[in-house]
Image (cartoon, grey):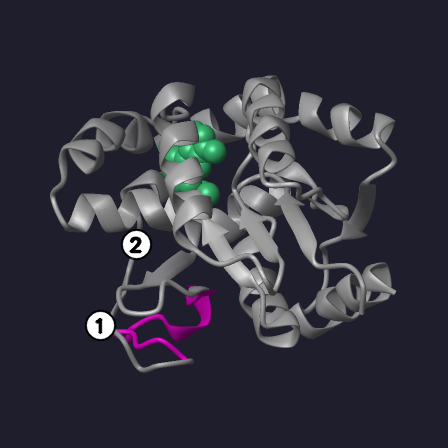
């Protein structure tokens, strides 16, 4: 397969993280999630983590300068032989411009932007039942396992927790921020003929089949 540098865009709760894990296995590509990077800074109590936390728990975007710097270091650190999957970056047009400059300097380009589309009421339902693995970061919905006091990750058996930004008041703000700041990058990539929309309603496997179709 030729396509190797892929960006995943979509509202919070659209299933990007879950699909990214499957895509990473299929393509053996470098996977970078800016949300995971921030959460890792947070659990290591770095200065960046402490700064980012203020924005994350409020459902706001972390300032561009901090985010772009972190992403650029991550891209530098890793080899680019296998292509990359970017999950959660860019999240606004400033970041999209910065990414294109970073890639130009490395003589790289974006092959495909996958836009995961889900109606708003479905997003709210998914986010409020979403738990995340402390070990492998995989997101999963556990509304069916009510009464299970210590739910375990269905991939690695790690302990699951509810992200503080999946609390109801943050969910609303994150969806608004997505509409105001992130949606404009859909046009940005559409104009470059890079955007493919994925209907992200359905089972994880159904959605992944659509993703595979888009890679052809
Ligand atoms: P995510 O795991 O992608 O939902 O990201 C969780 C939170 O991390 C977001 O709500 C933001 O506060 C922050 N974050 C992640 N990626 C970015 C980004 N590209 N720009 C700014 N903030 C980000």
Q: Is residue 45 visible?
A: yes
Q: Is residue 146 magenta?
A: yes
Q: Which residue is mark 2?
A: 162
x, y (%) of residue 92?
57, 23
Asked which quadrant contains residue 180, the reply is top right
* Residue 142 falls inside the magenta stretch: yes
Counting from the top left corner in percent of width and height, residue 81 is at 59, 63
Residue 194 percent across, percent down from the top left: 82, 40
Pointers 1 and 2 in contact (CB under 8 A)? Answer: no
Looking at the picture, how far across and down is residue 36, in whole percent? 37, 50
Figure check: 8 above or below 50: below
Q: Could you tell me what secondary structure mostly forms the magenta stretch? A: loop
Q: Secondary structure at mark 1?
A: loop
Q: Residue at x 72, y 63 (%)?
A: 202
Q: Which residues are magenta?
A: 140-154
Q: Callout 2: helix, strand or loop? A: loop
Nearest to the observer: residue 90 or residue 161 = 90
Would you say 159 lies left or right of 61 here?
left
**Which quadrant of the figure shows ligand 1?**
top left
Could you give the CA–CA distance between mark 1 and mark 2, rounded to whole angstroms?
A: 13 Å
Q: Which residue is mark 1?
A: 149
Say whether disc 1 or disc 2 marks the residue closer to the N-terminus.
Answer: 1
| Crowdedness near tag 1: few (<14), some (14–19) or many (≥20) residues, C-alpha within 10 Å | few
Quadrant location of residue 78?
A: bottom left
Q: Is residue 122 left or right of residue 212?
A: left
Look at the picture and state if 138 lies above or below 191: below
Residue behind label 2 places its C-beta within 8 angstroms of ligand 1 = no
State the residue in front, 31 or 172: 31
Mark 2: few, some, or many residues within 10 Å (few <14, many ≥20)?
A: some
Query: Looking at the rendered structure, which numbered label has been put on residue 39?
Result: none
Quadrant for the N terminus, please: bottom right
């Amino acid at each position: 397969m030729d396509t190797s540098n892929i960006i995943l865009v979509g509202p919070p709760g659209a299933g990007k993280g879950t699909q990214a894990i499957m895509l990473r296995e299929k393509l053996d590509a470098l996977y970078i999630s800016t949300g995971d990077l921030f959460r890792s800074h947070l659990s290591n109590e770095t200065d960046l983590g402490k700064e980012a936390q203020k924005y994350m728990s409020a459902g706001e975007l972390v300032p561009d300068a901090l985010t772009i710097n972190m992403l650029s270091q991550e891209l530098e650190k890793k080899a680019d032989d296998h292509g990359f999957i970017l999950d959660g970056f860019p999240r606004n047009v400033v970041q999209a411009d910065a990414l294109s400059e970073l890639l130009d300097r490395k003589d790289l380009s974006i092959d495909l932007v996958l836009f995961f589309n889900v109606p708003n009421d479905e997003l709210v339902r998914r986010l409020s039942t979403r738990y995340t693995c402390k070990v492998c970061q995989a997101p999963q919905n556990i509304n069916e396992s009510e009464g299970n006091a210590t739910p375990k990750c269905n991939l690695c058996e790690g302990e699951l927790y509810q992200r503080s930004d999946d609390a109801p008041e943050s969910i609303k703000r994150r969806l608004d921020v997505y509409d105001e700041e992130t949606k404009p990058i859909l046009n940005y990539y559409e104009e470059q003929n890079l955007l493919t929309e994925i209907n992200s309603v359905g089972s994880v496997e159904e959605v992944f089949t659509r993703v595979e179709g888009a890679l052809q």
